[in-house]
Amino acid sequence: MLLRTFAVLALLFTLPVPATAATPHCSGYVALTYDDGPHKQFTRPLLSALQSVGARATFFNIGYNEEANPDLLRATVAAGMWLGNHSWSHPHLTKVDPAELTKQLAETQRVTREIVGQTPTLFRPPYGDTNAAVEAEARRQGMAQVMWTVDTWDWAGVSTEKIVKAASTAKAGGIILMHDGHRNTLAAVVPIVRDLRARGLCPGKIVNRDGTAVVTAP
């Protein structure tokens, strides 16, 4: 099911592709996003797969996982990926009290900044569970709330083929939801990027702007 995107402009660009491949022509841009990391088993292979096709993605990480795996957070940044806030411990944020809501976002901001010197400007609520109070708190802490336009259902354990098929419905300006921590998601990286480029689309960056969802070339 398509969900609206809050307070974002998808302005997308790619890393250089390998010298043996032609530079792709980008007539539009799609954001690849991965939630729930860093993951001991999957983050490094995921980064390698993205780099192998010259693609960058946004990682909406859980603060607790970042604190437990600082080397993987550093590796994510070193690989040229972008970081977003996915709360500290992945609760339903609409069900916590205001103090806990503030802490869930602030602690992830803190640990990300302490480990890699970056403070995320993008936020994705766990489970997509949000309301006006959650969005307002994210904005108060300097973050735009980001949802998605394509859910690959990788979190439900669907096959690589189904993940790729879902991603193939993404259009220019779309944001694809995936997760760091699933073998089938890892296997889907290369075919997803190849399909995008076959359709003249390139992976890239989500940039907070004025509440619209307009896609432009860099």
Image (cartoon, rainbow, N blue to C red):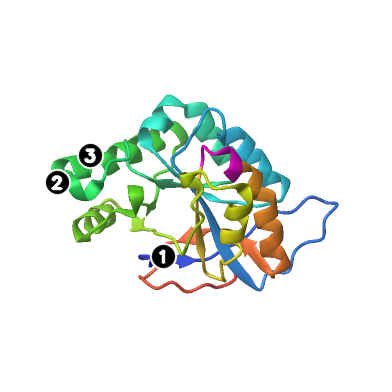
Left or right: where 115 falls relative to 92: right
What residue is shown at x 65% (from left), y 44% (from top)? 187
Q: CA distance from mark 3 to mark 1?
A: 23 Å
Tell me the amino acid under the disc marked 1. Val
Where residue 121 appears, as percent x and y from the top left, is: 39, 52
How packed mark 2 is, by other alpha carbons closer than 10 Å (few <14, some 14-19, many 20 or more), is some
Range covered by the magenta-colored residues: 180-185
Left or right of 189, for residue 59 = left
Give the residue at mark 3: 103
- Other residues around mark 1 within 10 Å, as few (<14) / some (14–19) / many (≥20): many
- Circle number at residue 8: 1
Q: Residue at x 18, y 40 (%)?
A: 100
Q: Tell me the quadrant of the picture where the N terminus can be found.
A: bottom left
Q: Is residue 22 left or right of residue 74?
A: right
Q: Could you tell which of marks 3 and 2 lies nearer the N-terminus?
A: 2
Q: Mark 2 falls on what kind of element? A: helix
Disc 3, disc 2: CB below 8 Å?
no
Q: Quadrant of the C terminus?
A: bottom right
Q: Amino acid at mark 2?
A: Pro
Does the magenta run of residues contain 28? no
The mark nearer the N terminus, 3 or 1, is 1
Indicate the secondary structure of the residue bearing disc 3. Answer: helix
Disc assigned to residue 98: 2
For the residue pair 139 and 132, the one nearer the viewer reads as: 132
Residue at image x 26%, y 58%? 135
The answer to whether residue 10 of the structure is visible from this angle is yes
Can residue 59 be seen from the camera position used here? no
In this view, the residue farthest toward the top is: 68
